[in-house]
Image (tube, helix red, strand yellow):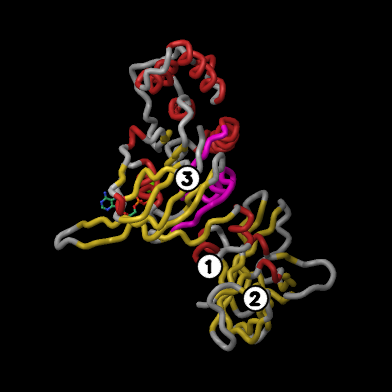
């Protein structure tokens, strides 16, 4: 049954090249996934997502740290413990559709139960349940080669869930699908995993996928876990500039920290105007400060009075039908601002008032 996963101080070093160089693919990564929870590891290519997942699966042997599943250590090099992958009872879904091409849907999904010598009557029931869960019951007797990519991936999912694994591991399972299928299966995946009550570790470099699927998101960079939080926390209180930028807060406004209280800082910007920003890591009075701001948190022509209102100059307008992306100069800096709606109200050259909501301006040290 689904179990808690604990990853403790995990470190994996690869040695490559001539002369050989050591590089930590993951460096003291620790996190816990509660039973039945979905955690998504999000980060750019090469940050160590797959390596982390493979360590949990037992396919990769870490140099140090522990993998504890349901209270039992499965990987613990210091104690000489390394349970082989087949004895971990985990489910795995990968990018490529790892289905048996010469088998029907039912035969594919039955396969792991036969390998586990599950009694026949139980096999049939479990397969029926798994196929119903992924909505492929009526395709049971089709050869898998006659399925679409999305359907094949659902077969792979059913096959990795049919034996009720302790943990479900998914490595970019949607990345081989075309855009439309990808969106559909993305929404289905969370429902399917939740309905099955599985603990899941899901790896992707797609922020939207992470937000839609995860109960919590772990943002990784260069082998380190920078922040593990709910999607709302990640999107509204990023721990540092990298997390802010990777999740779409791409605007940067530079200045100098004048003073701060417990939650907010006053930052003198290049234009000499003062910006009120949330206090983040690495800030010091009198020192350089950098504010991250999402384009979609810039408010044009705000109603009423309020803090952080500035005059902005519209430099460019990119009309996208249901939204418009502007470049504006404000506080001596060029930033992007997004306005939702089909009207595109501001022309190039216009002077507009914008509000930068203080709780959406995140100040960090440089
Ligand atoms: N078998 C290996 N031998 C040497 N280096 C490796 C090996 N596997 C991974 N690495 C290196 O470890 C780092 C992390 O790789 P990993 O595959 O975990 O990244 P990732 O986050 O999954 O990236 P992607 O999004 O591209 O799949 C990379 O620098 C990679 O080159
Ligand atoms: Mg990978």
- Distance CA(mark 3)–CA(mark 2): 47 Å
Could you tell me if residue 316 is visible in this image?
no
Asked whether 210 falls inside the magenta stretch, the response is yes
Q: Toward the viewer: 28 or 105?
A: 28
What percent of the width, then of the height, locates residue 167? 47, 37
Vertical position of residue 162 compared to residue 357: above or below:
above
- The residue beneath circle 1 is 240
Q: Quadrant of residue 221?
A: bottom left
Asked whether 168 falls inside the magenta stretch, the response is no
Q: Earlier in the sequence, mark 1 or mark 2?
A: 1
Report helix, strand or loop for mark 3. strand
What percent of the width, then of the height, locates residue 178? 48, 36
- The residue beneath circle 3 is 5
Q: Which residues are magenta?
A: 197-220
Q: For this view, does 54 lie left or right of residue 39?
A: left
- Distance CA(mark 1)–CA(mark 3): 26 Å
Of tags 1 and 3, the one toward the viewer is 3
Q: Earlier in the sequence, mark 1 or mark 3?
A: 3
Q: Residue at x 53, y 35 (%)?
A: 198
- The residue beneath circle 2 is 330
Q: Toward the viewer: 179 or 255?
A: 255
User: Any atom of ligand 1 within 8 Å of the CB at mark 3?
Assistant: no
Report helix, strand or loop for mark 1. loop
Of tags 1 and 2, the one toward the viewer is 1
Q: Residue at x 42, y 57 (%)?
A: 29
Report helix, strand or loop for mark 2. strand
């Amino acid at each position: 049954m689904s179990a808690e996963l604990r990853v403790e101080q995990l470190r994996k070093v690869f040695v490559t090249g001539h002369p050989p160089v050591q590089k930590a693919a993951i460096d003291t990564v620790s996190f816990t996934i509660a039973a039945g929870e979905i955690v998504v590891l999000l980060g750019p290519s090469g940050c160590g997502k797959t390596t982390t997942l493979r360590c949990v699966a037992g396919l990769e042997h870490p140099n140090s740290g522990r993998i504890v599943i349901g209270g039992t250590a499965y990987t613990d090099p210091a104690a000489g413990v390394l349970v082989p992958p087949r004895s971990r009872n985990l489910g795995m879904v990968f990018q490529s559709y790892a289905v048996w091409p010469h088998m029907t849907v039912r035969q594919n999904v039955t396969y792991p139960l036969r390998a586990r010598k599950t009694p026949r009557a139980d096999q049939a029931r479990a397969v029926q349940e798994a196929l119903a869960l992924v909505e492929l019951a009526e395709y049971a007797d089709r050869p898998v080669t006659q399925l679409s990519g999305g359907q094949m991936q659902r077969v792979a999912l059913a096959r990795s869930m049919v034996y009720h694994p302790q943990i479900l591991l998914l490595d970019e399972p949607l990345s081989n699908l075309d855009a439309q299928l990808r969106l559909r299966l993305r929404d289905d995946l969370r429902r399917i995993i939740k309905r099955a009550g599985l603990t899941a570790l899901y790896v992707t470099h797609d922020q939207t996928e992470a937000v839609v699927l995860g109960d919590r998101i772990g943002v990784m960079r260069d082998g380190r876990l920078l922040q593990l939080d709910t999607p709302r926390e990640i999107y509204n209180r990023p721990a540092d500039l990298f997390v802010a930028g990777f999740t779409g807060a791409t605007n940067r406004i530079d200045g100098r920290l004048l003073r701060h209280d417990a939650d907010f800082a006053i930052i003198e910007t290049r234009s000499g105007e003062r910006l009120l920003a949330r206090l983040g890591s690495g800030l010091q009075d009198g020192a350089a400060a950098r504010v991250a701001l999402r384009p979609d948190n810039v408010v044009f022509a705000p109603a009423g009075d309020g803090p952080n209102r500035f005059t902005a100059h519209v430099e460019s307008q990119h009309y996208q039908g249901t939204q418009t992306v502007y470049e504006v100069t404000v506080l001596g800096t060029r930033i992007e601002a997004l306005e939702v709606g089909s009207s595109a109200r501001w022309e190039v050259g216009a002077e507009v008032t914008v509000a930068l909501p203080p709780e959406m301006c995140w100040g960090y040290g440089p």
